[in-house]
Image (cartoon, rainbow, N blue to C red):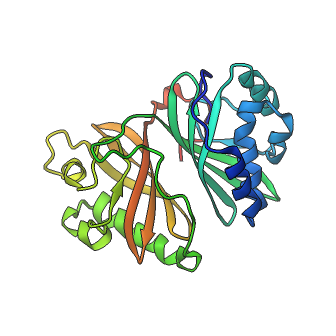
Amino acid sequence: MLKSPSRKITQCNESSMEKKLTAMASHKKEQIYKLLKGIETGDPASVAVVNEEKYIQHNPQTREGSEGLAALFKRLSKTSPSVNIVRIFEDDDFVFAHTEYDFATRNIGFEIFRFENAQAVEHWDNIQKRKGPNISAHTMVDGETKVIDYEMTESNRMVIKSFIEEVLIQSHIETLDDYINQENYVEHNPRFGDDLVELTSALSRSSKDNSIKYEKCHRLLAEGNFVLSVCEGYARQVPTSFFDLYRLKDGEIVEHWDTTEAIPPRSEWKNNNGKF
């Protein structure tokens, strides 16, 4: 979740986000929003949501117990970092957020927190350097943010489960039309465009460098029309974690954001909890 601090990035409208928070039924979302913004402010109250005695960190580059979060946030805030929470969701005991950071570099991330007894006790993330816009002029974070269709949460989760298994893992690229509404599809990956030409090539088993290969889906989190998948596989033959956020409409994928991050060798891990 945390890298080296640097300069400011353009912020979303604070008053607008506060209005969104006011409208949120979930106190968990508000707590995680304040936790992540605490990196900017250094406010020690922002980390009250975390049970540091039970906290399990899955970022392999972060040591556990080496520095309390309150002390860490206070130290980072002195370097004027910026944190933009673009989207935030809840699924039972989990809160997951789509974020933009400006630390040493401008990064895009997904953050997942698991709650237990009203406190965050476990954390996963996936961070990628910001790139783009892509050939269709979309950035890694713009697009729809509104959660709707709450009654379709589980059916949307099942659509993405089937899509990952059939298309991404089994490489049945010919079935893309069964899942993606190509007339209205919006792609935010900096490498690909809305027309799916580059994506289809990257996923194809006949690709010369076999550039993207999904092997296992570890987690599917959903709220309404949004589903986040946590998968592992290979990008250009390097062990990689894939966090993909999908927006669905009428049971079809109409928008997609993602981050990919190379998984360091086990010998370089700073904790023993594993990426997933």
When the figure is inspected, residue 251 is found, relative to residue 264, above or below; the finding is: below
Is residue 121 shown to the viewer in this render?
no
Residue 14 locus on image (x, y percent)? 69, 44
**Considering depth in this image, is 132 or 27 the residue closer to the camera?**
132
**Considering depth in this image, is 196 or 93 the residue closer to the camera?**
196
When the figure is inspected, residue 227 is found, relative to residue 240, above or below; the finding is: below
Q: Residue at x 27, y 43 (%)?
A: 135
**Considering depth in this image, is 267 or 63 the residue closer to the camera?**
63
Is residue 71 shown to the viewer in this render?
yes
Judge left or right: residue 207 versus residue 20.
left
Where the N terminus falls, by quadrant? Answer: top right
Residue 255 locus on image (x, y percent)? 40, 60
Quadrant assignment, res 28: bottom right
When the figure is inspected, residue 9 is found, relative to residue 226, above or below; the finding is: above
Q: Residue at x 66, y 56 (%)?
A: 95
Judge left or right: residue 220 versus residue 89.
left
**Considering depth in this image, is 189 or 91 the residue closer to the camera?**
189
Residue 192 locus on image (x, y percent)? 28, 46
How many numbered badges does the structure rendering display? 0
Q: Residue at x 49, y 58 (%)?
A: 144
When the figure is inspected, residue 270 is found, relative to residue 194, above or below; the finding is: above
Residue 30 locus on image (x, y percent)? 75, 54
Judge left or right: residue 29 versus residue 70.
left
Quadrant assignment, res 2: top right
